[in-house]
Image (cartoon, helix red, strand yellow):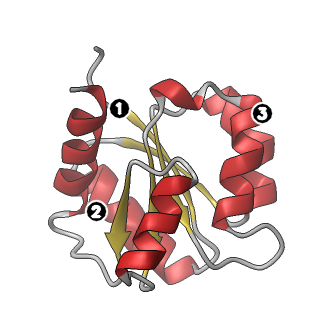
Amino acid sequence: MNALQRVLHVEDDRSIQAIARLALENVGGLQVLCCQSGQEALQQAAAFDPQFILLDVMMPGLDGPQTLQQLGNLLDLRNIPVAFMTAKVQPDEIAYYRSLGAADVIIKPFDPMTLATQVRSIWSAFHG
C-alpha cells in the first residue's frame, strides 16, 4: 500500500473548506483538492486521482450521498476510503452513511490539529 498523499475534500462552506485545507496540508502534509460542490468534484476527481475522499453530507445540488454514488461511476471506490463529514451523527445516521459505502464519519466541528491523524487512521483501518 502506498502512503496516503492525495485527499479530495468536497465542502460547500468556504470557511470549513479553508480550515480543513490548512489542517490537512499544513499540519498533515497532504495534498488536497477542495471542491465546493458535488458537481465540481465529479468534474475534477478523475484527474486528481484521490486516495481518500472527505465528503460533506449537506450540500446544495448534489448532497454527499448523491455525490458518493456518482463518484462511484468515475473512480474505483473499492480502493478509496470515503469519510462523510457531518454534525448529524446519531447511530442510525452513521449506520446509513456506512450502508452507502462510507469507511467512517468525521464529526463536525472537527479539531484542525487532529483531522489529518483521523484521516490517516481511517485510511489505515480501510487498508488493514
Q: Judge left or right: residue 107 versus residue 118.
A: right
Which SS class for mark 3?
A: helix
**Where does the C terminus fall, quadrant-wise?**
top left
Q: Judge left or right: residue 122 versus residue 75.
A: left
Q: Amino acid at mark 1?
A: Gln
> How many labels, in total?
3
Which numbered disc, 2 or 1, marks the residue that appears first in the sequence?
A: 1
Q: Judge left or right: residue 102 versus residue 29.
A: right
Disc 1 marks which residue?
5
Give the mark toward the camera: 3 or 2: 3
At 58% from the left and 53% from the top, the residue drawn is: 100
> In the depicted view, which residue is nearer to us: 119 or 32?
119
Which numbered disc, 1 or 3, marks the residue that appears first in the sequence?
A: 1
Gap between marks 2 and 1 measured at Cα: 14 Å
The residue carrying pointer 3 sits among few (fewer than 14), some (14 to 19) or many (20 or more) residues within 10 Å by Cα, namely: few
Which SS class for mark 2?
A: helix
Q: Report which quarter residue 52 is drawn in.
A: top left
Numbered label attached to residue 23? 2
Disc 3 marks which residue?
73
Q: Amino acid at mark 3?
A: Asn
Q: Position of residue 46 (x, y in %)?
A: 70, 30
125 lies above or below 22: above
Gap between marks 3 and 2 measured at Cα: 29 Å
Gap between marks 1 and 3 measured at Cα: 22 Å
Q: Amino acid at mark 2?
A: Ala
At 22% from the left and 49% from the top, the residue drawn is: 28
Q: Position of residue 92 (x, y in %)?
A: 44, 77
Q: Position of residue 23 (x, y in %)?
A: 28, 62
